[in-house]
Image (cartoon, rainbow, N blue to C red):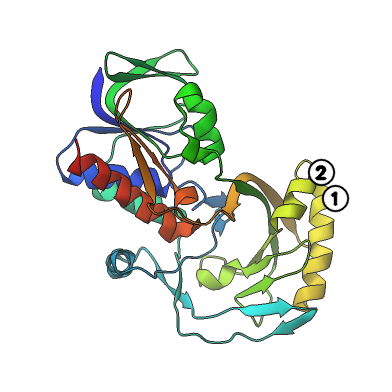
Amino acid sequence: MTHETIVIGAGLAGLATANRLRAEGQNVLVLEKSRGLGGRAATRRWDGLPVDHGAQFFTARSAAFQEQVRQWLSAGVCHEWTTGFHQFRNGRLQPPQDDAHPRYACRNGMSSLGKAIAGSAQIPVQFEVRAASLECESGYWKITVENGASFQTRRLVVAVPPPQAAELLGTHAPDSLRPIQLDPCLALATRYPERKLDWQGIQSDAPSVSWIGHDTSKRPGLHAGQTVVVVHAPAEFSRNHFSDPEETTARHLLEKASEISGVDLRQPAATFLQRWRYATTTTPPGSEPAVRIDAPAPLILAGEGFAGGKIEGAWLSGMCAADLLSKHP
């Protein structure tokens, strides 16, 4: 079957593209290698507890995304979590400097964003379908997936991390993909018997801990009797220790997180470690949050890597991708 548009990747950029095109009455199919929506806006059900083990919160700076967030707030998808976080800088923990800029979270987890985007337009998504190769024949893209099946489309949107996009596109990969680098992140989720913490999040400049999040503070009542804390490691530490044993990584991160927070976090009841190979980007956003290439057939490259990272960047990239297709079919 030939589809008008196929989107590879059901992260927020890919879903935003598909949502917009579906709203315009176009035929769209999304292919996703995993079992879930939203990419790094991810939530794990941990013994029934929702825990954000990817992106922890989001902001809204642009007028377009602020309007989208207002709709999500009205629908109960997200809520304002805080306007500032504690800061650990130069060896000292400092209270939040309230800048009155809301940080939003989702009571049922950040995966609520992907579900909201996909559900609003009833986007057709095929899960656990990993694209293995691309060919262009007579003006159509042919996508072959790992199980040997193939899909055909006149217009293709690739909304996966740039290193993966470059590998998939091969000789069709444009030079604009090469400079975009995404750094890894080790994310450790920890669980304790219920305890009081005096912070919602701590942003840190320490060599091995960049973030300590009080995940339970996002979702009152859903972690009854328990407290969940999520610790992120910065890019360099994550790169150097990406394959270390989970027990070793957990012990080190919790020792450092305890020193930073002033709370003893070294003896959790349970932990799990998420290794994100492509997480944060230090590459400045380009002039456009998505890129269109017309030969040998229409191809759009999108994702947070083109827009400076973060939830808003991914959404804006997806909207730009849809515009590039709608304005120049």
The reply, left or right, for residue 171 in relation to residue 273 is left
Tag 1 secondary structure: helix
Q: Position of residue 113 (x, y in %)?
A: 39, 55
Tag 2 secondary structure: loop
- Which residue is more in the foreground, 309 or 262? 309
Q: Position of residue 171 (x, y in %)?
A: 49, 22
The residue at which mark 1 appears reads as 248
The amino acid type of the residue labelled 1 equals: Thr
Residue at point 70% right, 60% down?
Answer: 190
Residue 241 visible in the shown view: no
How packed is label 2: few (under 14 Cα within 10 Å), some, or many (20 or more)? few
Residue at point 80% right, 78% down?
Answer: 91
On residue 244, the disc is 2
- Which residue is more in the foreground, 62 or 257? 62
Q: Position of residue 217 (x, y in %)?
A: 56, 73
- Inter-mark Cα distance, 1 to 2: 7 Å
9 relative to 170, above or below: below
Residue at point 47% right, 29% down?
Answer: 173
Whether residues under marks 1 and 2 lie with C-beta atoms below 8 angstroms apart, the answer is yes
How packed is label 1: few (under 14 Cα within 10 Å), some, or many (20 or more)? few
